[in-house]
Image (cartoon, rainbow, N blue to C red):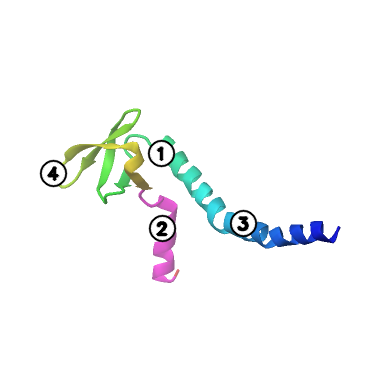
Amino acid sequence: MQAGSAGWLGFAPLIFIFAIFYFLLIMPQQRRQKKWQQMLNELKTGDKVVTSGGLRGTIIALKDDAVHLRVPPDNLRLEVSRGSIASVTTAEEPGKETAGKKQASGQ
């Protein structure tokens, strides 16, 4: 019986290390992936986006696997894959702007 319990105790540190890796690395990455996928599914025309290559533009048309962007200053029309969209940048909400101005003015 002692040999069996010693074998289990030998695997305990490996299981513990795997649990740490899961909670510190794997689970947060899965959350980020789900959030990014949700962001891609919610894209609509008029959204301002930044691509993984650093291009900033406004969505003017959507396709199944691609997005048409209008990129300033010359209003170029570019087609990029949906997967290359890194983030959606939106203008501040009106309520937040006025709250920020009130705090800055000391009111």
Q: According to the image, label 3 marks what residue?
A: 18
Secondary-structure class at tag 3? helix
Residue type marked 3: Phe
Q: According to the image, label 4 marks what residue?
A: 74
For the stretch drawn in magenta, the main secondary structure is: helix
Residue that appears at 54% across and 52% down: 26
Q: According to the image, label 2 marks what residue?
A: 98
Residue that appears at 38% across and 52% down: 92
Q: Which of the two discs, 4 and 1, sits closer to the camera?
A: 1
Q: According to the image, label 1 marks what residue?
A: 40
Secondary-structure class at tag 1? helix
What span is colored magenta in the figure?
90-106
Can residue 50 be seen from the camera position used here? yes
Single out the residue that lies furthest toward the bottom: 106
Depth order, front residue of 100/31: 31
The number of numbered badges drawn on the structure is 4
Quadrant assignment, res 40: top left
Residue that appears at 39% across and 63% down: 101
Q: CA distance from mark 2 to mark 3?
A: 49 Å
Dot placed on the residue nearer the N-terminal end, 1 or 3: 3
